[in-house]
C-alpha cells in the first residue's frame, strides 16, 4: 500500500498499533485523549543530560547513522523547560545529584525519564564514596537501559518503550529508591550492613572522643592539625 | 619466580649520583637531599620538606636541569607501610623539553603535621593539584591562594583517599555551592553561571563568570561534577581489573587509556609485549586519536552554531567503531588490552576494516577541511582568541595538541617512542600563535599523520603471538586449560592471586589524544596497586581556561572550551 499525504486525512491510513482510532471513508472518529497521546508519542522532545561515557553513545544515536528522527524524537532540547523526555546518560556523582533533581523539576508535565547505562541505573561499577547508586534515589525512572554503555539500538528500543508507556498512560510518580538514601528501611543488603557497621564504628569512636574515621577535625588537639585558615596568605 | 630487582634494595639507597642532576642538587641544596634512586629508568629524588620549594625552583631554573614542564603533583598515603617512616608523601613530576628527561621529586610528611610550602608561585599548574591533594588527603599547602575542596561536594566530610577511609562511604550531598568566584564588594558586574548543565559546556562543567556587559571580567571553574573515584577504586582492584576503568577516563578515545595503562604496568614488571601486539596497539591507538579529534572538532563547531560538520564527521567514527567492535565486541568501552599484550588476536578482516576506516576518515577530514578551514565565520570566531604563550603553556602543564598549538614540539611518540613508534615516519605539527585556530589546525593535521602511521603499521604488521609467554602475567590459552593440569593450575593461581609485581614506583606515560597521559603507580608487591595516580592531560588544560577567557566575550569562552577538548571523565576521574 502506498501512502499519500491526503490519505491520512481521508482516514485511509491510521497508526495500526493504535486502538483508539477508528477510520473509514472520509471520517476519523476517536477520543481526544487518544489523539493527544498519539501526538505526544510521536513528537518526543528529549533533553540529553549527558554526563559521561554514555553521552558519547547518545550522540551516536542522534547522529546520522542510527538516526533517532525515525522515531520522532530528534528534536534535542538542552533546556529542561522545553523537553518532555529526560535521558540521563552517564554517571551521576553526588555533587551532580542536586543538579539532576533541579533539571527534573524544571521539566513541564507530562515527563518521562530514561536511565541510560548501568551507572544511571545502579551506580554501575563505581561503588564508591562520591557516586550516586542509581538515579532512582532522587528521580522517578520510566525505562532502565542496562549496558556500559548501551548500544544505540538499545536506546532506540527505550524510546519505543517510552512510546508504549505513553500510549498506555503508565508513569512513574515516585522515585523508587527514595527510601534508600540513609533511611533505616534500606532494602539492599550489603549497603545496609555497611551503613550499620559505619554507624557502630562512628559511635565507638565518638565515645573515645575521636572524630569519625577519615575525618581530620581541624583544631582538634587529638588529631594535631590546626585549621587551614591561618595558613592562607 | 619473583620479578627482578626490587626498587628499595639497599644498594640503590646510595649517595652515588646516578646522573648530573644529583650533583647539581647536592651542590645547591646542601643537606637538603635525602635520597636519590633510579628504578626502571625513573629518576626519583627525595628532598627534605624545608627544601621543597627551593628544589622546585632549582630544577626549573638551573640551565642544566631546565624542568619547565609541570606534569603532576599528588600525595601518597603510606599508612601501615613499614618501609617509610612518615605517613604521607608528596610527589611531583616534571619534564624538561630541552633535555628530554622526566624527574620525580618527593618529600615525606608526618601525619601529625601534614603541611608543605605551596608551589603555586613556581608553577602555575600547581594550584589545582594542591587543592586536590588537600581535598583527598588533607595535606595543607602553606601560602596557597585558595585552598578549598575541588573534587568532592561541599557537604563532604573527611579526606577520601586516605587509607582509613572506606571506599563506599558517601555523604548526603547538599545544594550546589552558590559562589565559586570571589566577587569584590564594590563590583558592579553580573555573576553568571555557565553550567553545570549548559548546552555549550560539554558534559558537566561549571564556570562562574563575572560580567561587565558581555565582557568577562573574572572566571572561576568548579570541578568534581564527574568525580567518580577511579583512583580509590583502583586501590581495591587487581592490575587487570583496572583496565575497564581506564576506558572510562577519556571516553572519546578509550583504547588509548588502556594502552597507556598496559605500558605502565609492563614498565613496572619489566616486560615487553610481543611485536604483533604492539603494532595492533599502535593501529588502534591512532584510530582512536582520529576519533577523539573528530569529537573535539565536531562538538566545537556545534557550539559555534554549525551542525553539518558534526553529522559529517561522525560518519568516520562509525567506521572506526566497526574496527574496534570486530576486535573485541565493544564499540566504546573496549577493554581490549591486557598486561603483556592483547586479549585476543585481531580478526581476519582486520586489514580490510582498517582500510575502510582510513578511507572514511580521509574523506570526512577533507570534507570538514573544506567546510571549516577557510570558512569566514569559523575563522573569525577562532582566530586570536584564547592565546597562550609557550612559556605559560609549559608552566600550566599543557601537553598534546594544545601545547603544540602554542609552538612547543613535544610529542611523547617522538621524544620517547614506545610500542615501536620509532619505526614509523610521521610529522609533529605545531602552531605559531597559540590561539584556538592553531589548536584546530594542529588537530586536523594530526589526524592525517595518524592515518599515515596506521597505514605504515598495517603494511608491516608482524605475525606471531599477541601476548607474552610468561606464566606470571598472561593466562594460558583456554584450550590448554581444558586439557592439562599445569595450565589449569596456572589459570587458577593467576586469577586468584593476580599479577604480583615487584615493590616500587614508576611513572608510565603515553601520548594520548589530549596530551601526556601518565600513570604513577606505587606497588607494594601485592596484587592490587598501593596507589594509582592518573596525570590527566585535561586537568592542566582546563586550569588555564579562566586565564584564556578573561577579558574576552562570552561567545569566545564557548569557542575556546570546545577547542581544549576537556573530557569530564578524565578531568575529575
Ligand atoms: S554506564 Fe558505563 S559507559 Fe555509561 S556512564 Fe557508566 S561507566 Fe560510562
Image (cartoon, rainbow, N blue to C red):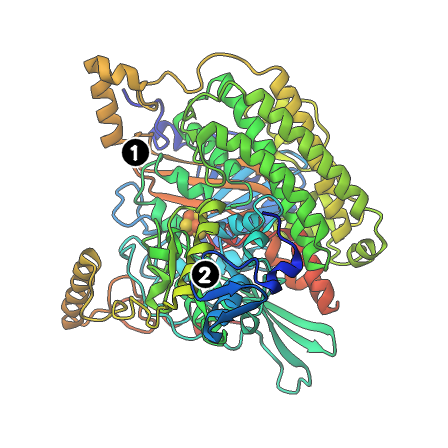
Residue at 72 percent across and 51 percent down: it is: B308
Secondary structure of the residue carrying tag 1 is loop
Residue B366 or residue A7, whichever sits in front: A7
Residue at 31 percent across and 70 percent down: it is: A217
Label 2 environment density (alpha carbons within 10 Å; few <14, some 14–19, many ≥20): few
Label 1 environment density (alpha carbons within 10 Å; few <14, some 14–19, many ≥20): some
Residue at 64 percent across and 24 percent down: it is: B355
Residue located beneath label 2 in the image: A18
Residue B68 or residue B203, whichever sits in front: B203
Residue B215 or residue A226, whichever sits in front: B215
Q: Chain of mark 1?
A: B
Same-chain check, marks 1 and 2: no
Asked if the beta carbon under badge 1 is closer than 8 A to the nearest atom of ligand 1, the reply is no
Whether residue B177 is visible: no
Whether residue B281 is visible: yes
Q: Position of residue A13 (x, y in %)?
A: 56, 57
Residue located beneath label 1 in the image: B525
Tell us which disc is closer to us: 1 or 2. Answer: 2
Above or below, comparing residue A152 to residue A204 in the picture: above
Amino acid at each position: 500500500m502506498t501512502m499519500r499525504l491526503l490519505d491520512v486525512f481521508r482516514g485511509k491510513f491510521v497508526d495500526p498499533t493504535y486502538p483508539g482510532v477508528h477510520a473509514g471513508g472520509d471520517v476519523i472518529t476517536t477520543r481526544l485523549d487518544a489523539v493527544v497521546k498519539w501526538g505526544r508519542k510521536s513528537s518526543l522532545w528529549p533533553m540529553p543530560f549527558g554526563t559521561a561515557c554514555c553521552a558519547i553513545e547518545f550522540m551516536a544515536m542522534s547522529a546520522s547513522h542510527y538516526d533517532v528522527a525515525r522515531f520522532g524524537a530528534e528534536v534535542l532540547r538542552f533546556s529542561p523547560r522545553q523537553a518532555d523526555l529526560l535521558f540521563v546518560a552517564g554517571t551521576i556523582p553526588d555533587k551532580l545529584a542536586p543538579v539532576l533533581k533541579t533539571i527534573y523539576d524544571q521539566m513541564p508535565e507530562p515527563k518521562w525519564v530514561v536511565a541510560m547505562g548501568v551507572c544511571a541505573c545502579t551506580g554501575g561499577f563505581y561503588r564508591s564514596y562520591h557516586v550516586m547508586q542509581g538515579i532512582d534515589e532522587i528521580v522517578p525512572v520510566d525505562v532502565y537501559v542496562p549496558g556500559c554503555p548501551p548500544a544505540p539500538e538499545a536506546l532506540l528500543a527505550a524510546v519505543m518503550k517510552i512510546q508504549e508507556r505513553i500510549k498506555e498512560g503508565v508513569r512513574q510518580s515516585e522515585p523508587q529508591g527514595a527510601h534508600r538514601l540513609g533511611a533505616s528501611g534500606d532494602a539492599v543488603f550489603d549497603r545496609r550492613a555497611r551503613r550499620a557497621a559505619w554507624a557502630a564504628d562512628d559511635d565507638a569512636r565518638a565515645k573515645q572522643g575521636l572524630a569519625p574515621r577519615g575525618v581530620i577535625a581541624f583544631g582538634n588537639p587529638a588529631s594535631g592539625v590546626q585549621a587551614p585558615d591561618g595558613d592562607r596568605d | 619466580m619473583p620479578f627482578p630487582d626490587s626498587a628499595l634494595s639497599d644498594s640503590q639507597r646510595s649517595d652515588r649520583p646516578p646522573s648530573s642532576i644529583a650533583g647539581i642538587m647536592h651542590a645547591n641544596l646542601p643537606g637538603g637531599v635525602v635520597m636519590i634512586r633510579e628504578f626502571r629508568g625513573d629518576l626519583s629524588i627525595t628532598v627534605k620538606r624545608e627544601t621543597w620549594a627551593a628544589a622546585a625552583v632549582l630544577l626549573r631554573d638551573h640551565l642544566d636541569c631546565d624542568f619547565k614542564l609541570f606534569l603532576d603533583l599528588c600525595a601518597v598515603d603510606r599508612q601501615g607501610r613499614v618501609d617509610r617512616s612518615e605517613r604521607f608523601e608528596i610527589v611531583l613530576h616534571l619534564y624538561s623539553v630541552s633535555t628530554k628527561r622526566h624527574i620525580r621529586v618527593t618529600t615525606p610528611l608526618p601525619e601529625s603535621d601534614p603541611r608543605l610550602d605551596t608551589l603555586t608561585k613556581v608553577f602555575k599548574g600547581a594550584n589545582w593539584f594542591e587543592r586536590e591533594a588537600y581535598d583527598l588527603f588533607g595535606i595543607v599547602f602553606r601560602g596557597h591562594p585558595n585552598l578549598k575542596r575541588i573534587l568532592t561536594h561541599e557537604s563532604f566530610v573527611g579526606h577520601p583517599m586516605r587509607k582509613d577511609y572506606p571506599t563506599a562511604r558517601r555523604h548526603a550531598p547538599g545544594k550546589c555551592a552558590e559562589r565559586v568566584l570571589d566577587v569584590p564588594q564594590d563590583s558592579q558586574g553580573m555573576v553568571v553561571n555557565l553550567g553545570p548543565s549548559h548546552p555549550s559546556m560539554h558534559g558537566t562543567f561549571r564556570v562562574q563568570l563575572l560580567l561587565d556587559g558581555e565582557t568577562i571580567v573574572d572566571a572561576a571553574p568548579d570541578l568534581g561534577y564527574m568525580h567518580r573515584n577511579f583512583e580509590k577504586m583502583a586501590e581495591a582492584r587487581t592490575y587487570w581489573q583496572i583496565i575497564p576503568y581506564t576506558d572510562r577516563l577519556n571516553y572519546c578515545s578509550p583504547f588509548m587509556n588502556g594502552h597507556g595503562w598496559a605500558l605502565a604496568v609492563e614498565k613496572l614488571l619489566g616486560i615487553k609485549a610481543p611485536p604483533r601486539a604492539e603494532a595492533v596497539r599502535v593501529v588502534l591507538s591512532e584510530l582512536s586519536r582520529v576519533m577523539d579529534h573528530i569529537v573535539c572538532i565536531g562538538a566545537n563547531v556545534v557550539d559555534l552554531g554549525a551542525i553539518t560538520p558534526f553529522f559529517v564527521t561522525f560518519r568516520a567514527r562509525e567506521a572506526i567503531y566497526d574496527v574496534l567492535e570486530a576486535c573485541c565486541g565493544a564499540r566504546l568501552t573496549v577493554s581490549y588490552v591486557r598486561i603483556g599484550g592483547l586479549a585476543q588476536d585481531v580478526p581476519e578482516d582486520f586489514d580490510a576494516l582498517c582500510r575502510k576506516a582510513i578511507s572514511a576518515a580521509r574523506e570526512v577530514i577533507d570534507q570538514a577541511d573544506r567546510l571549516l578551514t577557510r570558512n569566514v565565520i569559523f575563522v573569525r570566531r577562532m582566530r586570536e582568541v584564547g592565546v597562550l604563550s609557550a612559556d605559560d603553556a609549559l608552566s600550566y602543564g599543557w601537553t598534546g595538541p594544545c601545547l603544540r598549538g602554542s609552538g612547543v614540539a613535544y610529542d611523547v611518540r617522538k621524544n620517547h617512542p614506545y610500542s615501536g613508534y620509532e619505526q614509523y615516519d610521521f610529522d609533529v605539527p605545531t602552531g605559531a600563535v597559540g590561539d584556538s585556530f592553531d589548536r584546530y589546525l594542529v588537530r586536523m593535521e594530526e589526524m592525517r599523520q595518524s592515518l599515515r602511521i596506521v597505514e605504515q603499521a598495517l603494511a608491516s604488521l608482524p605475525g606471531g603471538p599477541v601476548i607474552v609467554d610468561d606464566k606470571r602475567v598472561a593466562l594460558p590459552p583456554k584450550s590448554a586449560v581444558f586439557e592439562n593440569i599445569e595450565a589449569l593450575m596456572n589459570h587458577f593461581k593467576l586469577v586468584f592471586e593476580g599479577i604480583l609485581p615487584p615493590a616500587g614506583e614508576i611513572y608510565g606515560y603515553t601520548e594520548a589524544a589530549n596530551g601526556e597521559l601518565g600513570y604513577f603507580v606505587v606497588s607494594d608487591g601485592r596484587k592490587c596497586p598501593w596507589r594509582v595516580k592518573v596525570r590527566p592531560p585535561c586537568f592542566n588544560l582546563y586550569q588555564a581556561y579562566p586565564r584564556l577567557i578573561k577579558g574576552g566575550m562570552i561567545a569566545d569562552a564557548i569557542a575556546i572550551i570546545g577547542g581544549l577538548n576537556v573530557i569530564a571523565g578524565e578531568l575529575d576521574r
